[in-house]
Image (tube, grey):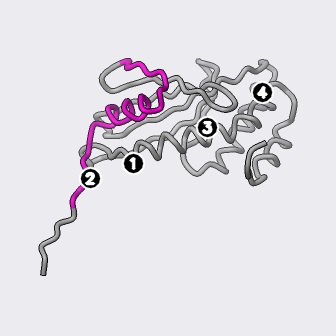
Amino acid sequence: MSDRRVSEPALHHPIDLVSRFVMQHDWYVRQSARNAILADIPGEWSHYQLSVTWQDDAEALVVICHLDLPYHEDNREALMQTSSALNQELWLGHFVYDLQGERLSLRHTLPLRGAGGATPEQIEDVVDIILGESELAYPVLYQVAVGEIAPAEAAKLTLIAHQGEA
């Protein structure tokens, strides 16, 4: 009988892993503090700002994707209603509207208490999912933000399965 030991994945500081992942994609990144980075990411529909913060006390990684949505003040309530409806469809994270900064963001907190770090795969998954969900939601949110469709109509559009590319 062989003595095979299951090798445990190497754990690293989550911010270091996020920085490496962002740099591998040639996205613009700036580290605002030891435990925080900002990355500007080009998307199909818009540019996104990814804000990632490691919270030592909670041992959690907070990942926020800010959506650049131009909107008229009259459409703010409709945008908030639509983002709330979209939250029911999201697999990971939730949309929040920052009243002070007046912007919509997709946010997720990845708890890593007791793990001693994160794996590259965990970081890739959470960033890919957050950016993917932002890309899927952006067209509907944009149409609501500029007043082209009402929140009720937007909710119907989010239920349509997305296949292929237009």
| In contact (CB < 8 Å): disc 1 and disc 4 | no
The circle drawn on residue 121 is: 1
| In contact (CB < 8 Å): disc 1 and disc 3 | no
The circle drawn on residue 9 is: 2
Q: How many marks?
A: 4
Inspect the image, locate mark 2, and give the three-letter code of the amino acid beneath it.
Pro
Say which residue appears at 39% left-offset and 48% top-offset. Answer: 121
- Where does label 3 land, which residue? 95
Q: CA distance from mark 2 to mark 1?
A: 10 Å
Q: CA distance from mark 3 to mark 2?
A: 32 Å
Badge nearest the viewer, 4 or 2: 2
Q: Quadrant of the C terminus?
A: top right
**Left or right: 49 as drawn, with respect to 159:** left
Q: Earlier in the sequence, mark 2 or mark 1?
A: 2
Q: Nearer the viewer, residue 108 or 19?
A: 19
Q: Earlier in the sequence, mark 3 or mark 2?
A: 2
- Where does label 4 land, which residue? 145
Pinpoint residue 96: horizontal percent, then vertical percent.
60, 33
Q: Quadrant of the N terminus?
A: bottom left
**Left or right: 17 as drawn, with respect to 93:** left
